[in-house]
Amino acid sequence: MSEPIVRMERDDDVVVLTLNDPERRNAMTEAMGRALGAEVASLVADASVRCVVLTGAGRAFSAGGDLGMIEGRAAAGRADPGGPAREENRRAMEAFYRLFLAIRDVPCPTVAAINGAAIGAGLCVGLACDLRLAATTARLGLNFTRLGIHPGMGATWTLPRIVGSARAAKLIYTGRVIDGSEAARIGLVDEATEPGQTLERTLDLAREIAASAPLAVRAAKQALARSTSASLDDQLGFEAARQAESYETDDLAEGMVAAREKRTPRFLGR
């Protein structure tokens, strides 16, 4: 029986999703996107998961979109400029983006373990996660303009929010590829790790997140997501409402007792 193209493994409260097409450096195909979307759907429904790690099998995180797919779309477009093929390509690409960006639907924190190349759309999936760690030797870049194509997969939305508008513009306009150390310096990733240690360091962070109260963490993820478009007054109201919910939980009671007893709390998510 062949290996699944997206592999899911669970370690207690932490789930690891692995893009699993190493021979093609985890090139992003519709089949991979559908498989990832199916796994995400199962995680959305599972309140016991406290953190999700996304990584790639083999030497790459993901080398980007499948070149055969891109070539096919380009051939159709050139054969009928401005005709029905343009609308079909637009529709198909938006649907393709949403398959992979389903990772944003996971209600608990997500962390990308960028073990190797994360190029173009492959990096965009990493940017869709809440946090990112990368090997110092990993290669990261949005090379769309170097191929002659407009950026996609949410690149122009996520990147400025992570590194700022000027740095995002430089990376997108030039299509520059940088290593993991440079990515950490500019805030594209949260930590650069030694090669071969990226997944383990990411799992350490995931377990640290999983040790926090899961209901509070999930609500905090919602708060952070909405904060970029909310006023302070609106955000204060959201925080107050979520804290009022927290007061009703067993987790808060456990956290308060553990603080008094100077021990690690054991949160049950209720």
Image: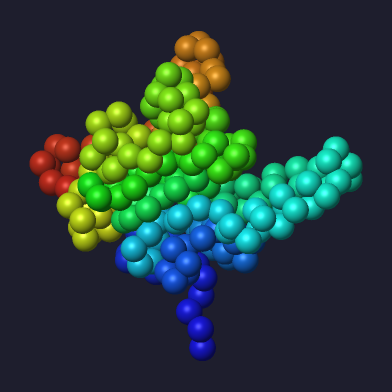
Tell which residue pokes out farthest to the left in this image.
262
Q: Position of residue 234 (x, y in %)?
A: 53, 15
Q: Is residue 8 left or right of residue 145?
A: left
The reply to whether residue 1 is visible in this rendering is yes
50 to 261, vertically: above or below? below
- Nearest the eye: 33 or 76: 76
At 51% from the left and 60% from the top, the residue drawn is 27
Tell which residue pokes out farthest to the right in this image.
83
- Nearest the eye: 263 or 112: 112
- Nearest the eye: 206 or 64: 64
Q: Is residue 49 left or right of residue 42?
A: left
Tell me the quarter of the picture where residue 40 sits.
bottom right
At 60% from the left and 39% from the top, the residue drawn is 148
All told, the count of numbered labels is: 0
244 to 216, vertically: above or below? above
At 47% from the left and 24% from the top, the residue drawn is 169
- Nearest the eye: 207 or 259: 207
Q: Is residue 185 left or right of residue 90?
A: left
The reply to whether residue 244 is visible in this rendering is no
Q: Position of residue 146 (x, y in %)?
A: 52, 39
Tell which residue pokes out farthest to the bottom in this image.
1
Coloured how? rainbow
Q: Position of residue 31 (x, y in %)?
A: 62, 66
Q: Position of residue 226 (x, y in %)?
A: 52, 27
